[in-house]
Amino acid sequence: MAVKALLHYALDVPDQGAGEKFYTSFGLTNASSRDNTVRLRPAALARESVLLYAGPKKRLHHLAFGAPGDEYEATRAAVRRASVREVDPPRGAPEGGFWLRDPDGNAVNVRNEGRVLPPADPPLQINSPGHIGREVRRACPEAGQGARPRRLGHVLLFAGDLDRQLDFYTRVLGMKLSDRCQKIIAFLRCTTDHHNLAFLTSPGPGFHHGSFEVGNVDEIALGAQRMLENGRPPGWGVGRHVIGSNFFYYVRDPWGSFAEYFHDLDYIPEQCAWEPRDFPEGDALYRWGPPVPEDFGLNRELEG
């Protein structure tokens, strides 16, 4: 039994219009809405990845995971065996599935749905020392291009108690620990991605960022450039993480959290002998890139 997909994340935000503008500038597309919820998705997918609800301040509304077919009932049975009580859905939540609260009080929806992937990109053609992958063709992207997020890859949450969160998501929902960095940060997976959910230690819970895959490093840089041109303040990147290995750029959203472009994340087949590693503190965030902004690890949901 285990959840097998991260479906979407949902936020309460004080200004849905500002949120819609931010995520569409980021590269997502408006999904059809049947109510007052703003729903956003990658252009290549029919299913939404981000839901925005009206609320007095920014906070996580819920996370949704998929457990298709037999995995759905097996996961529900595992929840009962773990003596975790099902709860009522939060206001305005989508119908379907069952609901839990994790140890930090975050609402979690498990749905009888599978993972949906976008169409595959053509293989990257790169020239490198001793290897020619591209001949008689220019590679520089055309002017005016931006980032095209293909899919939601992961969510990073602040955790008031890192070990309690890890126990809940591994023991109750069947996720696997990929890697961690001491008591600072930990990375869990429910797919072949290195991580679909991560936790950063904080005095209390909160939402840090959602991360979306793009097609190459050019798209990361072009997306960053476009967001700056659209008036967003500087975020963090371009750089490369140690844990997960992906290239990144973090864009600041209107409420002090982030949305990330990522490319080239570690791939872990479901049946493989991957051994989680406990990295030293110096590897918690990145191998190269600009200095980390002073407020990057600040949980603004604990302010005021």
Image: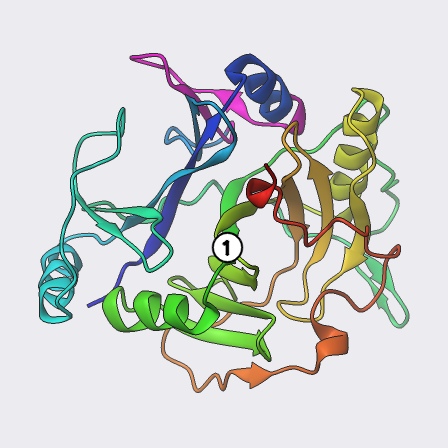
**Disc 1 target residue:** 204
Q: Residue at x 50, y 63 (%)?
A: 195
Amino acid type indicated by mark 1: Gly
Q: How many marks?
A: 1
Residue 279 rendering spot, x and y as whole percentages: 65, 82
Residue 264 rendering spot, x and y as whole percentages: 65, 59
18 and 42: which one is in front?
Answer: 18
Residue 38 colored in magenta in the image:
yes
Q: Residue at x 43, y 23 (%)?
A: 55
Residue positioned most to the front: 304
Chain part drawn in magenta? 25-43
Residue 234 rendering spot, x and y as whole percentages: 83, 36
Decide: is 191 above or below 153. below
Indicate left or right for 232 with 13 as reference: right
Decide: is 106 above or below 274. above
Q: Residue at x 57, y 61 (%)?
A: 200
Q: Is residue 120 visible?
A: no
Residue 280 colored in magenta in the image:
no
Indicate left or right for 95 with 145 as reference: left
Name the quadrant of the C terminus: top right
Q: Quadrant of residue 98?
A: top left
Q: Residue at x 78, y 36 (%)?
A: 224
Q: Quadrant of residue 73?
A: bottom left
Name the quadrant of the N terminus: bottom left
160 and 180: which one is in front?
Answer: 160
Q: Is residue 36 visible?
A: yes
Residue 39 rendering spot, x and y as whole percentages: 42, 23
228 and 280: which one is in front?
Answer: 280
Indicate left or right for 72 with 236 as reference: left
